[in-house]
C-alpha cells in the first residue's frame, strides 16, 4: 500500500509539474506574439496554482520552490558574466552616493506607511524593506529579454542592485534579531559575519578571477558545465548560510570568470537559466493567496504610486550621474521601479518569526504583485513612448523654427 501511495504521489507530482510548465510555455508564446516580456503571464500562471486558485497545487510545491531559487541564482550569475572585475570596482566606487539616496527615498515611505497603519516599529521597518529593494531577478530577466545588457545605462542599474544586495546583507540579519527579540550582540555578530563573507567573496572574485578561470577551463562542455554549476551553487549556499544573499554570491562568481570561459558558460547555462527563471516567476505567483488581496488593494495602489515615483527618481539620478542621455535615464528609472524576491523573503522572515501583524503579508503581496505585473509592461513600452514623444517634440521645434 505504501509503495502504491508513493507511486501515486510521484505520478501526481509529474502531472502537476507538467501542467505548470506547459501553461508557462503557452504564456510565454502568448507574450512573445504581442512583443511583451513573459514575466507578468508567468506570475498569473502561478496565481492559477496558488491556494484558492483555479488549480491549487498539492505535490510540486517543494520542487518549484527550490527551482525558483535556482532561477534567481542563475539569473544573477549570468548578469555577473556581463561585467569584468574592473567594471564592478568602478560601479561600486561611483554608486555609493546614489545607493544612499536610494535607501533614504525608498525605505522611508514603507516605514511611514507602517507607522500610519498603527504598526510597531519592527513591522514598519519590515514594510520599509519591502518598498526599498528592487527585484534583481525580474530586472536581469528583462535586460536579457529586451537585449539591453549592452546599453550604456545598464552599469548604473547594476550599481544600484549590487548596493541594494549589500544593504540587504546587513538588513536581514538585523531584522531577524529584532523579530526574535535577541540581544544586540547577536545582531552585531550576524551582521559582522555577513559583511566579512561579502568582503572575502568579493576579494576572491576581483583578484583571483583569471586564476580561477584557468583552473576550471576544459574543452569538454559537459565537464565545464558541471564545474561551473558546482562552483555557483557552492558559493551561493555558503553565502546564504552566512546571512548573505545567495544571489550576490552567484553574481560574484559570474564577475570572477574571464574570457573565453565566459562565452562557454553562457552557451551552456543559458537554457537552464531560462527554464528555472520561468519557474521562479511561477513560484512567485504561487505564494499569493488571492482572497487576501482585495481588502488591502487600495493601500497597495497608493504605495505603488508613491514608491514608484521615488524609485523612478533614484534610477533617473543614477543614470544621469553616469552621463547617460534622456532615453537611457528613463529606461534605468523604469526598470528600478520593479520590486520582487527580496520583498517576499522579508515577508517570509516575518511569518517564520510569528510576527503578529496580519496585514503585512497580504499588503506586501498585493504591492509586489501590482509592480511585478505592470512594471515589465511599462518597461516594454518606454522606448516606443520615448520615440513617439521625441518625434512630436522635433516636429513642434521644426514648426516653430519655420515660423
Image (spheres, grey):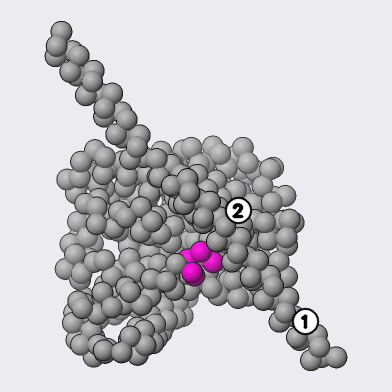
Task: Reply above or below: 316 against 147.
Answer: above
Q: Position of residue 174 (x, y in %)?
A: 47, 66
Q: Is residue 195 visible?
A: no
The residue positioned 31% from the left and 28% from the top of the image is 389
Residue 228 is labelled as: none
State which quarter of the image contains the N terminus.
Answer: bottom right
In this view, the residue farthest toward the top is 403
In the picture provided, is 138 more to the left or to the right than 348? left
Report which residue position mark 2 lands on: 44
> Are the residues flagged by discs 2 and 1 in contact, CB closer than 8 Å?
no
Asked whether 276 falls inside the magenta stretch, the response is yes
For residue 333, say whether it is visible: yes
Q: Which residue is mark 1?
A: 8
Magenta highlight range: 275-279
Residue at mark 2 to residue at mark 1: CA–CA distance: 28 Å
Label 1 packing within 10 angstroms: few (<14), some (14-19), many (20+)? few
Q: Secondary structure at mark 2?
A: helix
- Find numbered disc 1 in the image and state the secondary structure of the residue it sits on: helix
Which quadrant of the rendered structure holds the C terminus? Answer: top left
Amino acid at each position: 500500500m505504501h509503495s502504491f501511495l508513493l507511486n501515486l504521489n510521484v505520478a501526481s507530482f509529474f502531472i502537476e509539474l507538467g501542467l505548470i510548465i506547459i501553461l508557462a510555455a503557452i504564456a510565454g508564446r502568448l507574450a512573445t506574439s504581442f512583443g511583451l516580456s513573459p514575466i507578468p503571464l508567468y506570475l498569473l500562471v502561478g496565481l492559477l496554482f496558488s491556494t484558492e486558485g483555479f488549480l491549487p497545487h498539492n505535490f510540486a510545491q517543494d520542487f518549484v520552490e527550490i527551482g525558483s531559487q535556482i532561477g534567481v541564482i542563475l539569473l544573477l550569475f549570468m548578469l555577473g558574466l556581463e561585467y569584468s572585475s574592473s567594471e564592478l570596482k568602478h560601479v561600486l566606487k561611483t554608486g555609493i552616493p546614489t545607493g544612499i539616496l536610494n535607501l533614504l527615498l525608498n525605505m522611508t515611505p514603507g516605514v511611514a506607511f507602517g507607522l500610519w497603519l498603527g504598526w510597531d516599529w519592527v513591522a514598519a521597518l519590515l514594510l520599509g524593506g519591502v518598498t526599498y529593494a528592487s527585484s534583481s531577478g525580474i530586472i536581469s530577466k528583462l535586460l536579457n529579454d529586451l537585449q539591453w545588457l549592452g546599453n550604456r545605462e545598464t552599469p548604473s542599474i547594476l550599481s544600484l542592485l549590487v548596493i541594494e544586495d549589500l544593504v540587504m546583507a546587513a538588513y536581514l540579519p538585523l531584522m531577524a534579531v529584532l523579530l526574535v527579540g535577541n540581544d544586540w550582540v547577536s545582531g552585531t555578530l550576524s551582521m559582522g559575519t555577513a559583511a566579512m563573507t561579502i568582503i572575502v567573496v568579493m576579494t576572491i572574485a576581483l583578484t583571483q578571477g583569471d586564476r580561477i578561470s584557468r583552473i576550471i577551463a576544459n574543452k569538454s562542455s559537459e565537464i565545464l558545465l558541471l564545474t561551473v554549476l558546482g562552483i555557483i551553487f557552492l558559493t551561493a549556499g555558503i553565502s546564504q548560510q552566512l546571512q548573505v544573499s545567495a544571489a550576490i554570491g552567484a553574481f560574484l562568481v559570474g564577475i570572477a570568470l574571464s574570457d573565453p570561459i565566459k562565452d562557454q558558460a553562457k552557451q551552456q547555462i543559458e537554457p537552464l537559466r531560462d527554464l528555472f527563471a520561468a519557474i521562479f516567476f511561477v513560484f512567485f505567483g504561487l505564494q499569493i493567496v488571492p482572497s487576501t488581496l482585495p481588502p488591502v488593494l487600495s493601500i497597495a495602489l497608493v504605495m505603488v504610486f508613491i514608491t514608484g515615483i521615488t524609485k523612478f527618481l533614484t534610477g533617473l539620478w543614477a543614470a544621469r550621474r553616469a552621463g547617460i542621455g534622456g532615453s537611457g535615464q528613463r529606461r534605468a528609472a523604469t526598470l528600478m521601479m520593479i520590486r520582487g524576491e527580496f520583498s517576499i523573503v522579508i515577508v517570509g522572515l516575518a511569518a517564520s518569526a510569528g510576527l503578529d501583524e496580519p496585514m503585512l503579508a497580504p499588503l506586501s503581496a498585493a504591492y509586489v504583485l501590482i509592480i511585478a505585473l505592470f512594471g515589465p509592461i511599462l518597461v516594454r513600452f518606454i522606448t516606443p513612448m520615448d520615440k513617439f514623444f521625441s518625434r512630436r517634440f522635433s516636429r513642434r521645434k521644426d514648426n516653430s523654427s519655420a515660423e
